[in-house]
Image: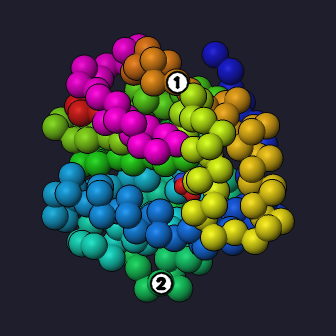
Amino acid sequence: MTTKAYKGLAMEGPIASWYAKITLKDIHRHQLMAARMVKHIPSGGRVLEIAPGPGYFCIELARLGQFHITGLDISQSFVEIARKNVAAAGIRAEFRRGDAADLPFEVESFDFIFCQAAFKNFSRPVEAIAEMHRALRSGGVGVISDLRRDASAADIQREIKGMGLSRLDELFTRWTFHTVLLKNAYTLDEMQAMVARTPFEKCHIELDGVGFLTWLEK
Ligand SMILES: C[S@@+](CC[C@H](N)C(=O)[O-])C[C@H]1O[C@@H](n2cnc3c(N)ncnc32)[C@H](O)[C@@H]1O
């Protein structure tokens, strides 16, 4: 078992700031996702977002109801950026630093756990899923949303075009998709096989544009 927290490039300092800037242009993605997820969270529910980055999903979710929201990210830069972003939005959510594969929370702490565009970066993905199971209450739901490795070049082009980026950011983003992201991404079968190595017994995977949503129920 490796103890390396990051798979690939660490998202700290200027890389984190650049990511926060370009993904803000695509805030609609978080608004749509929050509207989809909110139906699965009880009012007053305890929510954990693993690897929230700049915290945009947490902010959009908090606008839709009364929840206790926590974000946990391995990047100290993102923890600081997310704290600033929620304060600026007038939203209450806590952010702390930690590893998805070693969650610093008690058993059954959350009603809902979400993880988006990050799972492929985890160096210990099976442990991360098992940790979601441990931290969810019985009957709680976990969702992993990420890119799928078999997304076509045309699908990716469409996705990038919809992000509202400048030409330069678009070029760099396309390069990142093809050289880094797709290489790390999983197929649906690989996701299913990883979940099967954890205590989750209820799992279904839904295709979602260039990615998939893995629904897990404890
Ligand atoms: C591409 S960003 C996605 C951020 C956000 N979820 C979004 O949709 O924009 C990937 C995130 O995964 C985080 N990350 C990578 N490895 C991690 C780990 N082992 N535990 C927690 N967070 C991790 C990074 O710091 C970064 O915030």
Q: What stretch is highlighted in magenta?
A: 196-215
Q: Residue type at mark 1?
A: Thr
Q: Is residue 115 left or right of residue 172?
A: left
Q: Can residue 166 be seen in this view?
A: yes
Q: Position of residue 26 (x, y in %)?
A: 56, 68
Q: Please tell me whether the stretch drawn in magenta is mainly helix, strand or loop.
A: strand
The residue pinned by badge 1 equals 187
Task: Residue 30: name its quadrant.
Answer: bottom left
Q: In this view, does 147 lie above or below 42?
A: above
Q: What element carries label 2?
A: helix
Q: In this view, does 60 lie to the left or right of 179?
A: left
Q: Residue type at mark 2?
A: Ala
Q: Where is residue 10 in the image (x, y as percent from the top left)?
A: 76, 46
Q: In this view, does 141 lie to the left or right of 119?
A: left
Given residues 192 and 164, the one toward you in this image is 164
Quadrant containing the N terminus is: top right
Given residues 159 and 120, the one toward you in this image is 159
Q: Is residue 133 above or below residue 21?
A: above
